[in-house]
Amino acid sequence: MLTLGFLALSVGLVPLAILFALGRVWTLEVAFIRLAWVPLVALALQIMLWRPLTQTLSYGSIVPPLLTCIISLFFGIVGATLLAAHPSATRRPQLLRSTVLASVPGVLLVAYILVSFVRFFATS
């Protein structure tokens, strides 16, 4: 599990590095708004290709969705930081929508973990 965490951290830093590199071309907000859909689309593709993914990777097929959800958590943190950097009067609705869109897979992961804990403690 520790290895998976290090893998997620290293894989999660790559999209954030791309985001900050694009922040030099555009502003960081514009780069975030334009890349916020990537984690959700990646998770949707993994769900659509679930059967070939499980046939190819067997038990390891859980790793790509898990990494996508962890990367989504990183994107959600960046979006929340961008929202917090602005005074409340100048918050953009696009930035808020993009933050919610980017954090949907991460929220699904957190909800799954919470439900698992509740079911475990309820049955024991």
Image (cartoon, rainbow, N blue to C red):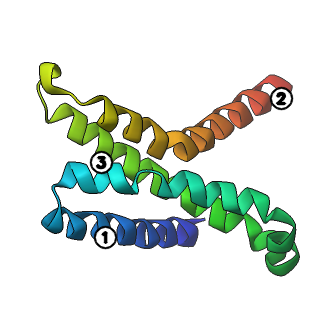
Q: Residues within 10 Å of mark 2 (few under 14, many from 20)?
A: few
Q: Are circles 3 and 1 on residues that touch, CB within 8 Å?
A: no
Residue drawn at (78%, 33%) of the image: 120
Residue where numbered disc 1 is placed? 18
Q: CA distance from mark 3 to mark 2?
A: 38 Å
Q: CA distance from mark 3 to mark 1?
A: 13 Å
- Secondary structure beneath dot 1 equals helix
Q: Give the mark, 2 or 1, whose residue is nearer the N terminus.
A: 1
Marks 2, 1: nearer the viewer? 1
Q: In the rendered view of the protein, which quadrant contains the N terminus?
A: bottom right
Q: Position of residue 68 (x, y in %)?
A: 56, 59
Q: Position of residue 59 (x, y in %)?
A: 81, 70
Marks 3, 1: nearer the viewer? 1
Q: Give the mark, 3 or 1, whose residue is nearer the N terminus.
A: 1
Tag 2: amino acid: Ser
Residue where numbered disc 2 is placed? 124
Q: Is residue 21 left or right of residue 87?
A: right
Tag 3: amino acid: Val
Residue drawn at (71%, 31%) of the image: 115
Please, which residue is most extreme toward the top here?
89
Residue where numbered disc 3 is placed? 78
Tag 1: amino acid: Ile
Q: Is residue 76 left or right of residue 44?
A: left
